[in-house]
């Protein structure tokens, strides 16, 4: 039994690793994709945003579908879909086709991640899940590390298309192992919330498209109206979710204080931090003129340390609960952002500052993710593991999506639009007033991230002490 559990964890790790590789590898190839497809900043931004957008909208529903039809079926189908989508991305012939193929890849990634946490909950008892979630975090951080390393290497020596092709052989092997070892566990009859999904899709699209149009065209009646319409739809979405019999976001789950505060902390942590890496890469490549390869080398140490520590921290959360680990983890991320705030266009020791900050944030991530995930699933109902896992991922994905939108919008608002475009698109050294002005925008975005991370830390601390159950309900 233990051996099969280890194999299952390994397969789940590969799934999270693949998703993580593509979350970071695209960042380092951003400018090469712009030039390779003869596109522009706004269109290629959607290569990043469409993945997060689809994950946010479909994650919870795909968790529910896993509850209905079997988590293993949806998980393995996700591997197949993700692999096909990756191959298509490598063959993309235009920016529009790449965005469309990334959408296919995103559906597969959502199927994988929505059901991974639930499969862990099915496989392990509550007081033994932390270590397993730690290995999932290890898979994520290994993937993020590989994404950075491979992003620099592949983009420099082979070209950006191969950042997608690398998923294909891994996906084929993992799909075969998943079919063999992850068995089906269908059970409950559940209905899907199509109206809720339509409302969430509409409001997110209005806000995201409006914000990106603002970055491109400055403030206009059109993009202001889109953003306002999206915000107006939020209370309607919440009201629908509270009254429908099969909600997309089950607010009943939020009655449990630990689960409620843990999911909220996950949202604000994603909102506050996940775009910071994007901005630092833009600083390294656009302001400092580093190649993708050199920029990747600077960012590796933090991810390596995080990969090593994540399973250990997950095991600690099994013994001592999650509050201290998640709170300290967010505090370390706050400290890292404060270090990034000290950067200027002429900082002489910027390499050592960024390495130190990446190490701090890596330790923080190793503490936060496995402990927070374990807290959520330990307080979830067994009949709703898939939906709860999907809910956690949905809130995190919405946070990640809005993180990029918020950061880029603030940076573009704080500085002239031409300066932002020069940095976001270029990889050559930008000197003089342009680089100095971009740092002003960078600092504005980082200050916003700092405030949001403080909120995440407060939710982690205020959730209270857990009482871990010894057996699955």
Image (cartoon, rainbow, N blue to C red):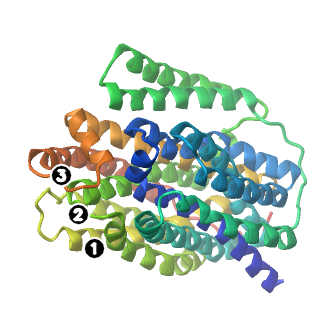
Picture quarter with the N terminus: bottom right
Give the number of the disc on residue 356: 1
Q: Residue tagged by mark 3?
A: 430
Residue placed most toward the observer, 26 or 222: 26
Asked if one can make out residue 324 in the rendered structure from this viewpoint, the answer is: no
Q: Residue at x 40, y 30 (%)?
A: 211
Q: Is residue 374 above or below residue 107?
A: below
Decide: few, some or many residues near mark 1? Use Cα within 10 Å; few <14, some 14-19, many ≥20. Answer: some
Q: Under tag 2, what secondary structure?
A: helix
Hey, which quadrant is residue 380 in on the image? bottom right
Residue 36 visible in the snapshot: yes
The residue depicted at 88 percent of the width and 50 percent of the height is: 69
Depth check, mark 3 against mark 2: the one in front is: 3
Left or right of 301 on screen, residue 252: right
Q: Secondary structure at mark 1?
A: helix
**Residue 370 % position (x, y):** 56, 68
In this figure, which residue is indicated by the disc labeled 2? 339
Are discs 1 and 2 less than 8 Å apart at CB? yes
Residue 122 position within the rendered picture, expressed as x and y whole percent measured from the top left? 79, 66
Task: Classify 10 Å Cα crowding around label 3: few (below 14), some (14-19), many (20 and above).
Answer: many
């Amino acid at each position: 039994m233990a051996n099969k559990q280890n194999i299952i964890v390994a397969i789940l790790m590969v799934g999270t690793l693949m998703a993580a590789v593509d979350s970071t590898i695209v960042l380092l190839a951003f400018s090469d994709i712009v030039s390779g497809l003869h596109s522009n900043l706004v269109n290629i931004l959607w290569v990043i945003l469409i993945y997060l957008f689809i994950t946010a909208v479909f994650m919870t529903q795909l968790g529910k579908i896993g509850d209905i039809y079997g988590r293993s079926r949806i998980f393995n189908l996700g591997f197949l879909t993700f692999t096909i989508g990756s191959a298509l991305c490598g063959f993309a012939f235009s920016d529009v086709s790449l965005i469309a193929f990334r959408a296919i890849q995103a559906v597969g990634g959502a199927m994988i991640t929505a059901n991974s946490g639930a499969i862990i909950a099915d496989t392990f008892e509550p007081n033994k899940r932390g270590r397993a979630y730690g290995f999932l975090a290890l898979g994520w951080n290994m993937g993020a590390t590989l994404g950075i390393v491979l992003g620099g290497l592949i983009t420099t020596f082979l070209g950006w298309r191969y950042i997608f092709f690398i998923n294909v052989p891994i996906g084929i092997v993992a799909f075969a192992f998943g079919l063999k070892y992850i068995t089906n566990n269908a059970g409950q009859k559940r209905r899907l919330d199509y109206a809720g999904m339509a409302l969430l899709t509409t409001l997110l699209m209005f806000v995201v498209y409006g914000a990106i149009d603002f970055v491109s065209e400055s403030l206009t009646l059109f993009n202001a109206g889109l953003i306002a319409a999206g915000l107006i739809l939020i209370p309607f979405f919440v009201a629908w979710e509270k009254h429908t019999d099969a909600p997309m976001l089950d607010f009943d789950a939020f009655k449990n204080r630990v689960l409620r505060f843990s999911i909220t902390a996950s949202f604000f942590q994603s909102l506050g931090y996940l775009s910071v890496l994007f901005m630092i890469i833009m600083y390294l490549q656009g302001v400092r003129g580093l190649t993708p390869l050199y920029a990747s080398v600077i960012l590796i140490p933090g991810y390596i340390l995080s990969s090593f520590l994540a399973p250990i921290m997950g095991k600690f959360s099994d013994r001592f609960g999650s509050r201290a680990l998640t709170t300290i983890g967010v505090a370390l991320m706050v400290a890292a952002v404060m270090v990034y705030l000290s950067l200027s266009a002429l900082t002489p020791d910027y390499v050592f500052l960024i390495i130190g900050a990446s190490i701090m944030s890596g330790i923080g991530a190793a503490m936060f993710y496995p402990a927070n995930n374990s807290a959520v699933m330990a307080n979830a109902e067994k009949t709703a593991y898939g939906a709860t896992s999907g809910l956690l991922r949905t809130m995190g994905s919405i946070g990640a999506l809005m993180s990029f939108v918020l950061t880029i919008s603030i940076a573009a608002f704080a500085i002239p639009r031409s300066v932002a475009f020069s940095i976001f698109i270029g990889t050559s050294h930008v000197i003089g007033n342009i680089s100095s002005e971009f740092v002003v925008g960078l600092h504005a975005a980082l200050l916003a991230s700092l405030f949001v991370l403080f909120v995440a830390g407060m939710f982690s601390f205020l959730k209270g002490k857990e009482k871990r159950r010894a057996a699955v309900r």
